[in-house]
Image (cartoon, rainbow, N blue to C red):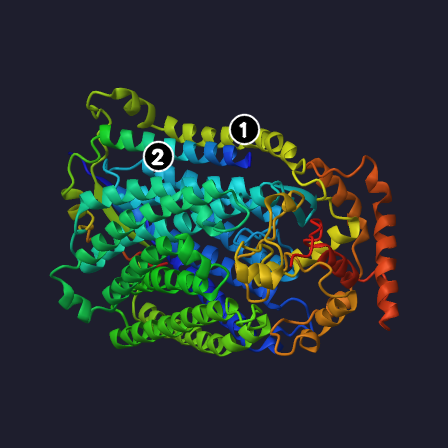
Amino acid sequence: MNQEKFYYDNKIPRLFAIACIFWGTVGMLLGVIAAFQLAFPVLNFSEYMPYLTFGRLRPVHTNAVIFAFVGNGIFTAVYYAIPRLLKTPMWNRALSLIHFWGWQFIIVCAAVTLLMGYTTGKEYAELEWPIDILITIIWVVFGINMFGTIFTRRERHLYVAIWFFIASWVTVAMLHIVNSFEIPVSFMKSYSWYAGVQDALVQWWYGHNAVAFFLTTPYLGLMYYFLPKAADRPVYSYRLSIVHFWSLIFLYIWAGPHHLLYTALPDWAQSVGTAFSIMLILPSWGGMLNGLFTLRGAWDKVREDPVLKFFVVAVTCYGMSTFEGPMLSLKNVNAISHYSDWTVAHVHIGALGWNGFMTFGMMYWLIPKLFNAKLYSRKLASAHFWIGTLGILLYAIPMYWSAFRSYFMMKAFTPSGQLEYEFIDVVQTVVPFYVIRAVGGTIFLIGVFLMIYNLIKTAQSGDFVESEEASAAPLVKEYTAPKNSIWHSLIERKPLLLLVLSLIVVGIGGLVELIPTFLVKENIPTIASVKPYTPLELQGRDIYIREGCYNCHSQMIRPFRYEVTRYGEYSKAGEFVYDHPFQWGSKRTGPDLARIGKKYGDSWHFNHMLEPTSMAPGSIMPSYPSMYENTIDKVSTNSKIHAMRKMGVPYPDGYEAIANQDLEKQAMQITKGLKENKIEIASDKEIIALIAYLQRIGTDIKLEPKK
Amino acid sequence: MSVIIILLLVSISIAGGFLIAFFWSVNDGQYDDDTSPAQRILFDNKKINTNKK
């Protein structure tokens, strides 16, 4: 058979590898800063500028780690492994470069806009609509390049790693498009098309599957390629890997509602989420065991080789996380863990252990290969391994501890039926744990610096292999498919590429038409007393979103005695029909705000936002002096009201024209009230809008005081 | 909760797409041999070209 000669391009994987390590360092550094901020609020630097408060920094940290660090890690693996698995170079070098630079551009835009306060307010999907469009374009470029490579392959069999990459690409595309449905109000501001419960469901359908199809399946593809390569032995059971793949992707997509247990989401949806989450343990552990058993009989190598050490701990962390995940999806366990530091510990076992250590292992293996050199120092790599492991432990253990401690404090009642602890007591109890956690993160980051030094030294000692020559026989075109030749003729050649792309286009088009029709009607309130926000409240709500308050405050009271006593009547689905986007939150570093309205006076909020410790001694909340300087953006009121009505919020026709008058009237009222409390402030400052919003939250339902 | 219809449509179409992919892969003979693919990835062309700039 005639052999064809071709070259693997190593420059693209090198670029992605550098980007991965660079953004990883940035993302982790931001994480460390955010962690210290929770213990030492002075680090928010909010007296000087509004850009670095926890509420803005934390989304940059999460986005950087997920999409910049892990994202570039995925692309490194894809651009290195796929050509070698398919015996062909990547389909189009220009697309590879567009993909690389496009992705880095997106990351920079994301970091800048998030710090400036441009956010949709939906976790891990915070980026505003122009960036969302950019992401879609670059993702499609990546897809064309990957499928182009698959269709021009010289190896008929698609190795399991490739299946993981394909599934990740397809699903992430869908998730991103569906969850990013938003109506633009201005260049960098939009509202989610969905409201309240619906928005919550879509968001966590997305959120959970972002974990599944961005942090997990592509990294499983990475595991199935790099782990056998590093151990130089085939995967334990190829058959198991196939079962692992197909069962995992069929189950993952249904598990999202487990992020909303005991919320206002309908019970049956919660149960569906729980059921699928429990089932997920089977394929997940199948994959973990397949990874670990690959090293059977090679444990002596693990003792020697830092690459394998990293892989073993990574796969073990994957196993721990995917055991913990289903457990956290049980309602009784979730009652403890939800809104607590437990969730934070859980995701960091995944992010630091699974994604972090997989990436480190891959880099220690790949960089010497790319530079045709030996790893500069195995000892240093081993040191990194132990430092990293210690970092993970120091991170996770205090978080578990603080989660349980705060749970027991939150639900403690005195014999006379009063809550035993104030929320602030709980905060002060967990602050020391936050310090240890931050130290754990710092130690983990030090390990990364050791790696960077080690890899630079390795690269310097070798010569970069720009391209590798390889040869293989071309794919026999006249492959006779067994029996069922419809699939074969339909899919085998280029038409499939067309099919895939046209499906995407049709899918997007169909959704664009479907979603408004479906959702607008839904906003007819089921609770008659629930009314749209006034213009001032709406502006205040946008400030609440801008500052990322949802990062620390939930707006969802669960139906437990200890929550109802502390925060007020539990939340009902009908209360949120005008909430574009929903702001239920996922973590209570501060207290729930679902019934904050009218709980304190305006002057309390005024003083509290300016200096939280003046009203709540021991508070770790940042201050927001800039809100007392900035004026409300009245120009946007018109288009905001207009956008809201388009989505079915029943503002009267022509209300846009008079909305600002109402806004000013309400602002004057609030300033007048403040003046009676000897507080002088102009009525057009942002703090007035925020107070208006805070005083509104949860007050639509009039509650009879219960005895 | 009408959004659930959209999510179901999207989720089922993704799952359906995967199902088609699964049938294709089985019919294509992707899994006729479940030993050698695992071995094959370990063998790379060893010839290395260092084309320096």
Residue closer to the observer: A231 or A519: A519
Residue A566 position in % (x across, y down): 59, 64
Q: Is residue A547 above or below residue B47?
A: below
Which quadrant does the N terminus of chain A fall into?
top left
Q: Is residue A584 above or below residue A489?
A: below
Residue A346 position in % (x across, y down): 40, 62
User: Hey, what amino acid is under mark 2?
Assistant: Phe
Q: Is residue A94 visible?
A: no
Q: Taking A58 as reference, is A170 left or right? A: left
User: Which of the numbered marks, if any, corresponds to residue B18?
Assistant: 2
Residue closer to the observer: A215 or A605: A605
- Residue lying at 37% horizontally and 28% vertically, measured from the top left: A496
Residue bearing the label numbered 1: A510
Task: Tell whether label 2 touches label 1 (CB within 8 Å).
Answer: no
- Residue lying at 73% horizontally and 65% vertically, measured from the top left: A600
User: Hey, what amino acid is under mark 1?
Assistant: Gly
Check the residue under mark 2 and report the chain it is in. Answer: B
